[in-house]
Image (cartoon, coloured by chain):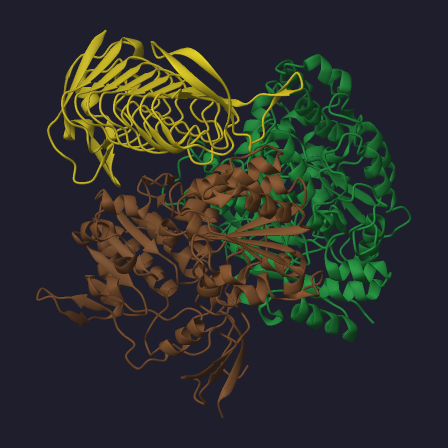
Chain colours: A brown, B yellow, C green
Amino acid sequence: MPKIVTDVGCPYCGASCDDLEILVSDDGKKILEVYNACAIGNEVFHHASSPDRLKRPRLRQPDGTYQEISYDEAVDYTAKVLLKAKKPLIYGFGSTNCEAMSAVGRVAEKSGAVLDNCASICHGPSFLAIFDNGYPSCTLGEVKNRADVVVFWGCNPMHAHPRHTSRYSIFPRGFFTEKGQRQRKMISIDPRETETAKLADIHLMVQQGHDYELFDAFRTVLRGHDIPDEVAGIRKEAILEAAGIMKNARFGMIFFGMGCTHTDGRNHNVDIAISLTRDLNTVAKYSIMAMRGHYNIAGPGQVWSWQFGFPYCIDLTKGTHAHMNPGETSSIDLAMRDEVDAFINIGTDAGAHFPIDAVKHLRKHPFITIDPNICMASEISDLHIPVAVVGVEEAGVVYRMDNVPIQFKKVVDPPEGVISDEQLFDRVYLRICELTETEPTWIPAKGHAKAPVTAGQ
Amino acid sequence: MATVTLTPYKTPELFLECTTITPDAFCGKAPQEIAELEVREGKTKLRMGDYFHVEGKAGKTPEETEIQILGDCTRVKYIGFKMTGGAITVNGNADMYVGGWMKGGKIHVTGNVHSFCGIAMEGGEILVDGKAENYVGCAYRGDWRGMRGGTIRIRGSAGNDIGTFMLGGTIIIEKNAFIHVSTHAEGGTIIIKGNVEGRVGGQMVKGDIYVLGEVQYMLPGFQKIEQVEKEVDGAKVKLDHYIGDLGERHPKSKGKEIYANLFVRAT
Amino acid sequence: MAEILVKNGYVIDPAQKIDGDVADVAIRDDKIVESVSSGARVIDARGKVVMAGALDVHAHVAGPKVNVGRLFRPEDKLFKSPEAQPNYRVEMGFSVPSTFKTGYDYARMGYAFVMEAAMPPLHSPHVHEEIHDTPIIDQAALPVFANNWFVLEYLKKGEIENSAAYVAWLIRATKGYGIKLVNPGGTEAWGWGLNCLKLDDPVPFFDVTPAEIITGLMKTNEYLGLPHSIHIHQNSLGDPGNYTVTLDSLKLAKGMKAKNKFGRTQVMHSTHLQFHSYGGDSWANFESKAKDVMNYVNQQKNITIDLGCVTLDETTTMTADGPFEHHLNALNHLKWANTDVELETAAGVVPYIYDKDIKVCGIQWAIGLELGLFTKDCMRTFITTDHPNAGPFFRYPRVIKWLMSQKAREATLETFKHRDKVIDATEIHGIDRELTLYEIAQMTRAGPAKALGLAGMYGSLAPGMDANVAVFNLDYKKMPSNPEKIEQAFQRALWFIKSGEIVVKDGEITSHGNKRTLWVNAKVKENPQVVRDIHEKFIKDYTVNLDNYPVRDYLAPNPFVIDVDVEA
């Protein structure tokens, strides 16, 4: 009899839904059906059951082909690459658990690497803004239970976070929002007429690249000053109308996405959005939140902040302390300036996401990919180490876009012999200790296995 | 003033971090001692002498010490890091953090500099004959205490984020700048002699900006109040005087709000 | 079997009423014993002070708002982080140190146990992840309750049994230790940008008052018989004139009796009292009311307090008192982070500089110390800085120096720009009391251990106790005339033995020790209504499923579980 596993977390987007139900085959090995998930989340689970999953690491041969090797050999290779490089870069972590992020912290510190995550090419500018201006935010349940005005600025959850509007932001009925969507005013600010914009009460079609000016206009009118007749392609009357709605909220919420972080000014667009949120808190209750992309891309920002004090772009080459300065220690800058001499791509696809010149520089040096799947990065790597799919074959803590930790379950076993990211990094760490003839400094207690959640429970 | 010359003879594979190229680190040392100072390339620790021939003589104090770098430092970071006095001349380009956290003395780079030139500077002078990348005279990440004093003059153009969180001192860009000038500033003076694309004085609380070229996109939070004639970097100019950022908080003096000033060449 | 003998030190152990006797402390494995064999490792403590490992009753060291403080302050790291010890983890940060630096620095000061003072329940897996990465020290965490919707609804109707059943469930689910109250009702009001500044200000929509919440949770606590009492951060924190609200809240404990099997005698722990002992009605006539507050505390045996001393540093304020941080941000205009947590609580974080040249900061500094100097019972008065709110925890040795030396206090006063105004607004200048090492040991060892219900494990060197032993470079018979030596001695212990393992030698870390997480397994008889309420709220209001809410066991891999059973 197939069995249902309930309350399963979805390892796709930053909405990190944890209400999925998965029908698993009698032997507990195969995923048959996925309930409650969006189309993409659905696919992640089915993909894990694909018969062509890799089961062993593959090492590039002199003739350019890949050949299977053992995990021990892959661990040894990785440890030696990290030790030999003057400045290795370990980048990724869009799709793994916090346990792996903690384990890699030890590896990076011991080997003197630069540690960075996908925020570097995504919400990194949001971090810069948070450094400079703070982050008045809340958990998504506050939006669900209280929000009566919701602004989506430079983001399109209807596509990027398919269940966001139904679970948290627009449609749900909460404690103080019994009427759901009817009780909420929705404003979309986007140069495109996205699906989210179509859903909104007001859509301000901001001129692309001029978000900062529009934010400044909102702030200026909120302080009672006049503004020009048109700002960033929006007429004054429309700005005044939207400002009026924002001001009259009881609980207002601003969600922003890559439309802010990856147009001119980047962090400053987010920075002034934070300033606007602060201003609005003098007349109503307001919060702001980054629409983080992956289900646990908030994770490295948390884990590494408590370990190193920085969320990303962490240069550990000094040995005695960590250094962070995006613009210098950020992956793209390091790669474009040819400032690193070894690269580990983990739980993401730098091959697809990085500028081609950056990839070309990285490719001059040892290049390792750690990922369950074949991707562009794995195909140009010297070594590809497959691992278990977190959220499907491996449990662990993930941080949702609002930094709420969600304890993801394991649904099925990984293919036989395939290890987790965490196990892999622990083995690399131990191998580095062996090679450097040093004692492992701190391995946390491993005695308690993770929550033994399997099919049928 | 005693002069030490550094002649680069090898290009690092990655980038060299030379926090020790300062009159403060050199003073009182013989060339062979200077050659022993630590520099870093990634995690490898090296000697100054592994990349530079060191000659000449250092003074007893930083003030009495001049450093002449006879060659290109395109791949050398942190020249003049935290220096308090004396002088450094780079005959060629320099990489990031030229004069970072500098307190006194003079730095002259005859070529270009990369980003973070004069970051969190407190005093002294930086002169760059070429252009600068981003973050001239900015604050370190998260710090609300940016440049506090001193002068930075870039004879070429500069990128974005000039004088972020500036509290004092002067930055002069003789050609064009891209975006974000004096963002979040609460003091100081920035002069851009060329054009700026936009975002001049965003979230600015106090301080002065002069743009002698054009501002392509003015912020809505700046309002023109008058036309004035002023001397700017030695030349008299007719200027439109704007106040702002009206969207930002401002301190009050005698019940009146004090705004930041933006002066743009009158058309 | 590992044996250690700490020999011939001046032992100071108030729990056994030992004050400076020259004696040996014997350790076998992780316990203190009567004697050890001749093969024991001998640590020569001749001429040095020997104390039990210390306990910190209140610090913000792990969890979401602490991590916001780390994340959003890179400038708190730059040029302010010490070099790592070879082969140990890097130690980043000043006012909000990394987990590694936190563990190391506490151990260097001879601390064995630290209470994380405010755990948002929804974020409890995060808190435990950080505790897990904090080496050496034992830790526990207090979940916050005073703005929790379940609690507000039960207490509005006066349902103590239901409140107790829910509280017991939540403490279990979060692997928490006790009941923390932060700005009762005010933080829920902050959900609408409002606050409750007085004890009879009703909470918007919930129609219950702070006084009812405090009393209700006090009753809940004693109903359950938890090891610790309610632990309260009162309303109106940081406001001039707030001492009246403070006294009103303290008075709610009148007549209440502690009911528990852990030796705890207080029913209310009033935390960081410095922030709550303010007179005047504006910053212009701001003044100390430490004496009035301590006069009351001194009479009431069922109240304990901790100081919350201002250390005059650049630090980071962080509290579940969301409206306070918003208010503070309006004063200093620095960056402001806020995290409201659905159905439960909120938190705000703002950097702050306690500048010795600002009059108010000087007065705050004086108030914290006055509380410690006006106390008549050091067993009920504990040293804290409300880390990092009034200053970082690694300034405890400086606070101890000020408490032990009038000379040190006067020297600091002399550096103030507004010395005379500070003297006028406080009593610090006239106080000649200098606390003794015995009193310091009460305030950092025996006292907090008793108040936390942990006197059977910590805070003493009696046989049977956990083997937490610190040796300090101080001569009990010849205390240094230079107070700086006191600070130096407490900053870096000569030796610190934690759970029987030498973790510090000459002020440097020598081992990652065996840290533990303490949590309370509170059990009440099944309460169907509360079970139903929990299920319903998770379906309707929470955004996380109930099944994924309780902290999984593997996140607290070295648990020490304290069972509390309430008989039907």
Looking at the image, is C22 positioned above or below residue B83? below
Q: Quadrant of residue A243?
A: top right
Looking at the image, is C445 positioned above or below residue A186? above
Looking at the image, is A360 positioned above or below residue C493? below
How many dots with numbers? 0
* x then y, percent, for residue A351: 25, 59
- Depth order, front residue of C265/A367: A367
Q: The C terminus of chain C is located in which quarter?
A: bottom right
Residue at coordinates 25% horizontally, 47% vertically from top-left? A335
Q: Is residue C58 left or right of residue B165?
A: right
Residue A309 shows in the view = no
Q: Is residue C499 left or right of residue C536?
A: left
Q: Residue furthest top?
A: B1
* x then y, percent, for residue A302: 48, 52
Residue C18 shows in the view = yes
* x then y, percent, for residue A390: 41, 68
Q: Residue furthest bottom?
A: A1
Residue at coordinates 55% horizontally, 73% vertically from top-left? A19
Looking at the image, is B162 positioned above or below residue A408? above
* x then y, percent, for residue C183: 74, 45
Q: Is residue C196 left or right of residue A419?
A: right
Q: Is residue C301 left or right of residue A301?
A: right
Q: Residue furthest left?
A: A63
